[in-house]
Image (tube, rainbow, N blue to C red):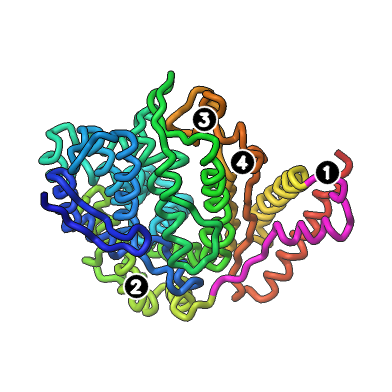
């Protein structure tokens, strides 16, 4: 039997065997999939972690590899790639789940969000949809050259089946859960791949042990994967590892600041294009960004949106007629980040100094600080004499897990068998049940405005003291 193999530092050998899998491998040469070579998995993280330059192309192959191993638990009797139709759709969805990501992924979506917020015309909704990877991915799967290969694999309705799994249309489908759930192939790959390439220490995931201990159960909510109680510690370790990667890697203050600067730069570029004055942004009229802005629904234009387009255009932005665009481009080139005030850290320090929260346990203390930080930051945003156009409130809540508490099992929760019953992991793990969460509350600002940082810090600290006093009275 013909078997093709791709070497990978995380999973060793990624194999394609049997007719259907070899058809998937042929899809790697498709221009839409090749584009993922030019989209980094972690966006601007290599500005902080220099080796974090791995691509969504490599990640997608890794997700396919993990999904195939998980699928072998769901369809244990299959040999030589003879998967069912839904099994083949699952592998295709795993391989294609990120196909719609644009340049710098979520940062590009944020750039369009900023543009639409500043320019709320109804016609701009099409632009926002055109950069939303959750909407673009199914569109590529069903309406591009990718779809032709999928039709060959499973018939005329097969692309829609694959797109449905990517969109998570049926949350009770076990095949969908392998692609998108709280314990899916996507998370199992990036929780190993991202810290490896970033050089970040993490608790690690014993993927081999987990897959060896996966079982298939069935209940009122369909079929699902579960482990017995002896392996649940490995699942607990998975949730903790993923949780801790957010403060150390995904939400690093420098990376988030640079993502905002990129978003602000691109939103200003879009404004010049919208005004019909792309030359003020340093762009010729046939530039791919201009073409995309004019015809966002054209997938051929979406095909051009990768990281290299931005880096290749940066020198044009540096020579733009627009001063704000030119300044931001120069700052990104020279790695001059916007400074940042950590509202949470300031609140923590004020609370420690006056002892207001000394008698609260950790969960209560975190809850109070979160509420105060959110209110202080949102109130600051309304102070027109202090808040400038370049100021940005960055907040991001990340819980350790989102329990469903569905007894009898559910494809979208992490299931553990205890005493013959299938329960949500949050029902038996003290760590997961703690409902631990991590939140950031940060204010980025332009230090070209002399003294702005000091004024912002003073206002934040005063507001925090008032907030703590109100909590104490409450």
- Residue 282 picture quarter: bottom left
Circle 4 sits on which residue?
432
Mark carried by residue 417: 3
> Which SS class for mark 4?
helix
Alpha carbons under labels 2 and 1: distance apart: 48 Å
Circle 2 sits on which residue?
311
Q: Is residue 143 left or right of residue 326?
A: left
Q: In the image, which is nearer the foreground, mark 3 or mark 2?
A: 3
Q: Is residue 277 left or right of residue 414?
A: left
> Which SS class for mark 2?
helix
Alpha carbons under labels 3 and 2: distance apart: 50 Å
Mark carried by residue 471: 1
Alpha carbons under labels 2 and 4: distance apart: 41 Å
Q: Earlier in the sequence, mark 2 or mark 4?
A: 2
Q: In the image, which is nearer the foreground, mark 4 or mark 1?
A: 4
Residue 257's place in the image compared with 93, above or below, is below
Q: Position of residue 60 (x, y in %)?
A: 31, 54
**Residue at image coords 56%, 63%:** 252
Q: In the image, which is nearer the foreground, mark 2 or mark 4?
A: 4
Crowd tier of the residue under label 3, counting other residues whose Cα lies within 10 Å: few below 14, some 14–19, many 20 or above: many
**Residue at image coords 39%, 78%:** 318
**Residue at image coords 34%, 37%:** 73
Mark carried by residue 118: none
């Amino acid at each position: 039997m013909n078997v093709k193999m791709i070497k990978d530092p995380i999973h060793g050998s990624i194999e394609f065997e049997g007719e259907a899998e070899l058809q998937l491998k042929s899809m790697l040469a498709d221009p839409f999939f090749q584009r993922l070579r030019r989209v980094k998995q972690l966006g601007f993280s290599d500005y902080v972690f220099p080796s974090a330059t791995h691509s969504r192309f490599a990640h997608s192959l890794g997700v396919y590899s993990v999904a195939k191993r998980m699928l072998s638990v769901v369809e244990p009797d299959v040999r030589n790639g003879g998967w069912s139709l839904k099994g083949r759709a699952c592998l295709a969805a795993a391989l294609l789940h990120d196909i719609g990501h644009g340049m710098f992924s979520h940062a590009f979506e944020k750039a369009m969000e900023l543009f639409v917020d500043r320019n709320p015309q109804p016609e701009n909704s099409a632009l926002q949809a055109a950069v939303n990877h959750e909407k673009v991915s199914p569109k590529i799967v069903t309406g591009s050259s990718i779809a032709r290969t999928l039709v060959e694999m499973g018939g005329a309705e097969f692309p829609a089946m694959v797109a449905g799994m990517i969109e998570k249309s049926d949350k009770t489908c076990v095949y969908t859960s392998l692609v998108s759930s709280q314990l899916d192939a996507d998370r199992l790959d990036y929780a190993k791949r991202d810290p490896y390439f970033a050089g970040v220490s993490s608790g690690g995931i014993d993927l081999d042990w987990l897959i060896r201990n996966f079982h298939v159960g069935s209940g009122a909510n369909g079929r699902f994967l579960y482990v017995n109680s002896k392996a649940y510690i490995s699942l607990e370790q998975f949730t903790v590892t993923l949780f801790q990667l957010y403060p150390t890697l995904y939400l690093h203050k420098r990376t988030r600041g640079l993502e905002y600067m990129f978003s602000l730069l691109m939103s200003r570029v879009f404004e010049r294009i919208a005004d019909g004055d792309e030359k003020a942004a340093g762009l010729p009229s046939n530039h791919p960004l201009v073409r995309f802005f004019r015809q966002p629904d054209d997938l051929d234009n979406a095909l051009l949106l990768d990281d290299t387009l931005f880096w290749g255009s940066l020198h044009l932005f540096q020579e733009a007629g627009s001063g704000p665009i030119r300044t931001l481009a120069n700052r990104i080139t020279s790695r001059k980040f916007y400074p940042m005030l950590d509202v949470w850290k300031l609140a923590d320090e004020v609370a420690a100094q006056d002892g207001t929260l000394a008698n609260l346990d950790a969960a209560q203390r975190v809850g109070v600080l979160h509420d105060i930080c959110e209110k202080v930051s949102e109130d600051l945003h309304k102070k027109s004499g202090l808040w400038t156009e370049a100021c940005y409130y960055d907040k991001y809540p990340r819980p350790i897990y989102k329990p469903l508490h569905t007894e009898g099992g559910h494809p979208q929760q992490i299931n553990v068998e205890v005493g013959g019953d299938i329960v949500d992991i949050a029902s038996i793990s003290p760590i997961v049940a703690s409902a631990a969460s991590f939140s950031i509350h940060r204010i980025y600002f332009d230090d070209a405005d002399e003294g702005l940082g000091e004024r912002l810090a003073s206002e934040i600290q005063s507001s925090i003291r008032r907030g703590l006093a109100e909590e104490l009275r409450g």
